[in-house]
Image (cartoon, rainbow, N blue to C red):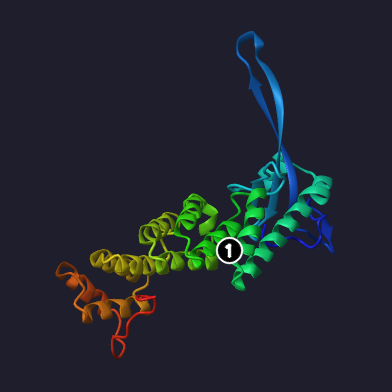
């Protein structure tokens, strides 16, 4: 939803210079449901609307429209065959209603982002709030509002946004990685350490193969004076990438300060043997940030 097709008519399959255009637009799906019991049972047909987009691998992601006619909530993936068998194009509805609302939503968030980048926090809060009135689950707007509160030092309000974000699986997807990282760093720098740890634990539930998540979690544990947990997180990062230089430097610095528990020294030594130690033991970036 962040980047809209410049041609709002793109929605159903179409031939273009001998190649089919990718599916993108609004489609409807009809579901037959039974209402009532016994002799009063009757069938009703319920029609729902979805924003659909074809991925590079040929799969189709579909996301329901909310009451404000913008895509919102969890996405799911279906095969092209399933999609063509169950969904019907709603070209006019997309062009006249949904596309303009999606475009306006993106403009609102872009205005909010510009205000935040210029340090105009109250204007940013207002614009992010307008976006969330249309789609309370919008990832960009939630992150933006949360960052605005953190930058303003309003921890209670930031915590309210945090509680929403950790429930949004889409917040931890690759397309939102830069916002995800910025939010996590700001949680830690604002001393919201329990939230920071919960945030990274939630991220690891969805993506266990990300060495940088373990490093970020180690920094949060370190700031919480939980040195054993910090070391364990760094060792997990090194399991994923034995050559991870930041993790090695972090461990070397902790060792130089005698902060590694004796029970973990052997594990640390084994991990360090996989990489020649860099000259000196500079403090890892971010420990005191």
Residue at image mark 1: 175
Residue under the point 58% across and 63% down: 175
* Outermost residue, left side: 262
Which class describes the residues within 10 Å of circle 1: few (<14), some (14-19), or many (20+)? Answer: few
Q: Quadrant of the N terminus?
A: bottom right
Q: Is residue 275 shown left or right of residue 203?
A: left
Expressed as whole percent of the image width and height from the top left, the position of residue 188 reads: 40, 66
In this rendered view, identify the residue nearer to me: 286 or 85.
286
Q: Is residue 255 shown left or right of residue 25?
A: left
Query: On the image, which quarter does residue 184 sit in?
Result: bottom left
In this rendered view, identify the residue nearer to me: 45 or 183.
183
Q: In which quarter of the image is the C terminus?
A: bottom left
Q: Is residue 114 shown left or right of residue 260?
A: right
Expressed as whole percent of the image width and height from the top left, the position of residue 171 reads: 53, 57
Residue under the point 60% across and 60% down: 125
Residue under the point 47% across and 51% down: 163
Expressed as whole percent of the image width and height from the top left, the position of residue 201 reads: 39, 57
Residue under the point 83% across and 49% down: 96
């Amino acid at each position: 939803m962040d980047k809209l097709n410049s041609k709002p008519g793109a929605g159903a399959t179409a031939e273009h210079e001998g190649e089919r255009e990718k599916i993108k637009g609004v489609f409807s799906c009809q579901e037959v449901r039974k209402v009532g019991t016994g002799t009063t049972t009757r069938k009703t047909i319920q029609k729902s609307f979805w924003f659909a987009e074809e991925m590079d691998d040929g799969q189709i992601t579909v996301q329901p429209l909310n009451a404000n006619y913008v895509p919102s909530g969890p996405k799911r993936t279906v095969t092209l065959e399933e999609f063509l068998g169950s969904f019907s194009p709603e070209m006019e509805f997309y062009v006249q209603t949904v596309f303009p609302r999606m475009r306006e939503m993106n403009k609102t968030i872009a205005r909010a982002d510009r205000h935040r980048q210029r340090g105009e926090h109250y204007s940013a809060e207002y614009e992010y709030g307008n976006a969330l009135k249309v789609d309370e689950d919008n990832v960009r707007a939630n992150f933006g509002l949360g960052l605005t509160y953190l930058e303003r030092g309003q921890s209670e309000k930031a915590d309210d946004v945090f509680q929403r974000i950790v429930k949004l699986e889409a917040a931890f997807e690759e397309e939102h990685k830069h916002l995800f990282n910025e939010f996590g760093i700001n949680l830690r720098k604002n001393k919201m350490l329990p939230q920071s740890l919960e945030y990274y634990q939630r991220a690891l539930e969805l993506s266990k193969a990300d060495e940088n998540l373990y490093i970020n979690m180690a920094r949060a544990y370190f700031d919480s004076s939980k040195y054993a947990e910090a070391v364990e997180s760094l060792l997990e990062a090194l399991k994923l990438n034995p050559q991870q230089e930041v993790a090695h430097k972090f461990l070397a610095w902790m060792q130089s300060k005698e902060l590694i528990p004796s029970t973990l020294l052997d594990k640390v030594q084994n991990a360090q043997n996989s990489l020649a130690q860099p000259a000196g033991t500079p403090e890892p970036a971010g420990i005191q940030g």
